[in-house]
Amino acid sequence: MNPIANNVALAFSFFLCISFFPLLNALPDITKTCDKVKHKELCIGSFKESYLGRYVPDNAEPDVLVSIIIKIVVNNASDVSRNLKTTVLEGPVPLTPEVRAKYGICDQEVVSAMKELDKVRTAMEARNHRSEKLNMKAAVTNVENCEKELKQVEAQLPDKKQFEEVTVLKELLENIDDIIKTVD
């Protein structure tokens, strides 16, 4: 091959590699978005764990990242709800009627929070920031109510894991709320 053809081939190869470089980086710089939240490490960790290997542009807008984080939190809430139901229905320890009732209330609150998150996503798509904030506040309140219910019977809980899961869910929701407040 002549020197000109070699240089063209080399330049083309370099251009090709550079153009695919963003695809190699599967995570956007989520730290900029997570810097705005109360529970930063949880924000970064949950995003990286859930979106490892998926392509999200480096320059993704905060509302795109919020939408992704909402999906992560809805999945987390679904797991929490399933674990609450499993403990009540199939738990190794019989529960007192009071504890069983608290688990039921808590589960209802988690399910309500998931519904509110769906409303947040719909409001985001419609660019209705007021509804986003109201529904987000409702979702946080739902999970706080769940946490309060479990706290009332904490000493009687067969497994402290559920209480910890609810606390993490609340922190994830607080993170979304913090991000939404900055998106306007």
Image (cartoon, rainbow, N blue to C red):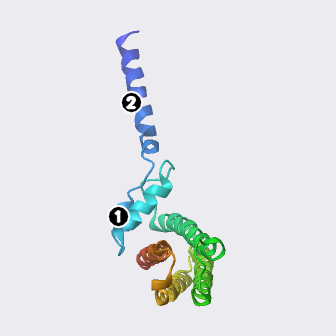
Note whether 109 is above or below 6 in the view shown.
Answer: below
Secondary structure at numbered mark 2 = helix
Q: Residue furthest front?
A: 93
Q: Amino acid at mark 2?
A: Phe
Residue at (43% x, 44% y) in the render: 22
Indicate the position of residue 136 as horizontal and vertical percent values.
Answer: 52, 81
> Image quadrant of residue 42?
bottom left
Residue 32 image label: 1
Indicate the position of residue 85 as horizontal and vertical percent values.
Answer: 63, 74
- The image quadrant where one finds the C terminus is bottom left
Say few, some or many: other residues with alpha carbon within 10 Å of mark 1 (under 14 / 14 to 19 / 20 or more).
few
Of tags 2 and 1, the one toward the viewer is 1
Left or right, residue 54 beside residue 171: right
Between 99 and 10, which is closer to the camera in this rendering?
99
Measured in 3D between alpha carbons, the distance from the residue under mark 2 to the one under mark 1, in whole angstroms, is 30 Å
Between 45 and 59, which is closer to the camera in this rendering?
45
Indicate the position of residue 108 as horizontal and vertical percent values.
Answer: 63, 83
Note whether 173 is above or below 137 in the view shown.
Answer: above
Indicate the position of residue 182 as horizontal and vertical percent values.
Answer: 40, 76
Secondary structure at numbered mark 1 = helix
Residue at (42% x, 33% y) in the render: 17
Total numbered labels placed on residues in the image: 2
Residue 14 image label: 2
Dots 2, 1 in contact, CB < 8 A:
no
Residue at (44% x, 62% y) in the render: 46
Between 94 and 59, which is closer to the camera in this rendering?
94
Note whether 141 is above or below 37 in the view shown.
Answer: below
- The image quadrant where one finds the N terminus is top left
Of the numbered discs 2 and 1, the one sitting upstream in the chain is: 2
